[in-house]
Image (spheres, rainbow, N blue to C red):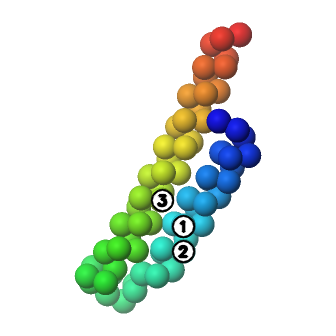
Amino acid sequence: MNKYLFYVLIFLSIALAIFNLTQVNYDRLFADSNLIPLGSAIGALAALVLLLIFDTSNKIKKNLDK
C-alpha cells in the first residue's frame, strides 16, 4: 500500500470518529438517537486499529525478508 494512501486513510478514520463523537448527546448517552453516531465512531476506531495492525505486519514482513 502506498504510504500516502495509508496516512490519508488513518486521517480519515480519526476524523470520522471525532465527527461522530461530536454528534452524540452525552446527556442521554443510551438514547436511540445516539446509536448511529456511537456505532459509526466505534467502526471508525476499529478501522484505525486494523490499519495500524496492517502497517505493523508489513514492517515485520520487510524485516523478515532482509
The image quadrant of residue 59 is top right
Which residue appears at 61% of the width and 52% of the height?
Answer: 9
Which residue appears at 35% of the width and 74% of the height?
Answer: 36
Could you say where residue 21 lies in the image, as x and y percent from the top left? Answer: 48, 74
Q: Distance between the Cα atoms at labels 1 and 2?
A: 5 Å
Q: Amino acid at mark 2?
A: Phe
Could you say where residue 41 lies in the image, as x and y percent from the top left? Answer: 44, 66
Q: Distance between the Cα atoms at labels 1 and 3?
A: 6 Å
Residues marked 1 and 3 touching at CB (< 8 Å)? yes
Could you say where residue 10 lies in the image, as x and y percent from the top left? Answer: 62, 53
Which residue appears at 55% of the width and 43% of the height?
Answer: 51
Q: How many marks?
A: 3
Task: Tell me the SS state at disc 1.
Answer: helix
Q: Mark 1, residues whose alpha carbon is within 10 Å: few (<14), some, or many (≥20)? A: some
Query: Looking at the image, is 66 positioned above or below residue 36?
Result: above
Which residue appears at 38% of the width and 71% of the height?
Answer: 38
Where's the N terminus, which quadrant?
top right
Q: Amino acid at mark 3?
A: Ala
Residues marked 1 and 2 touching at CB (< 8 Å)? yes
Could you say where residue 57 lies in the image, as x and y percent from the top left? Answer: 56, 28
Mark 1 vs 3, N-terminal side:
1
Name the residue tied to disc 3: 44
- Residue 19: give its label: 2
23 on left or right of 55? left
Task: Tell me the SS state at disc 2.
Answer: helix
Q: Amino acid at mark 1?
A: Leu
Name the residue tied to disc 1: 16
Query: Looking at the image, is 44 positioned above or below residue 25?
Result: above
20 on left or right of 29? right
Farthest residue to the top: give it: 66
Task: Tell me the SS state at disc 3.
Answer: helix
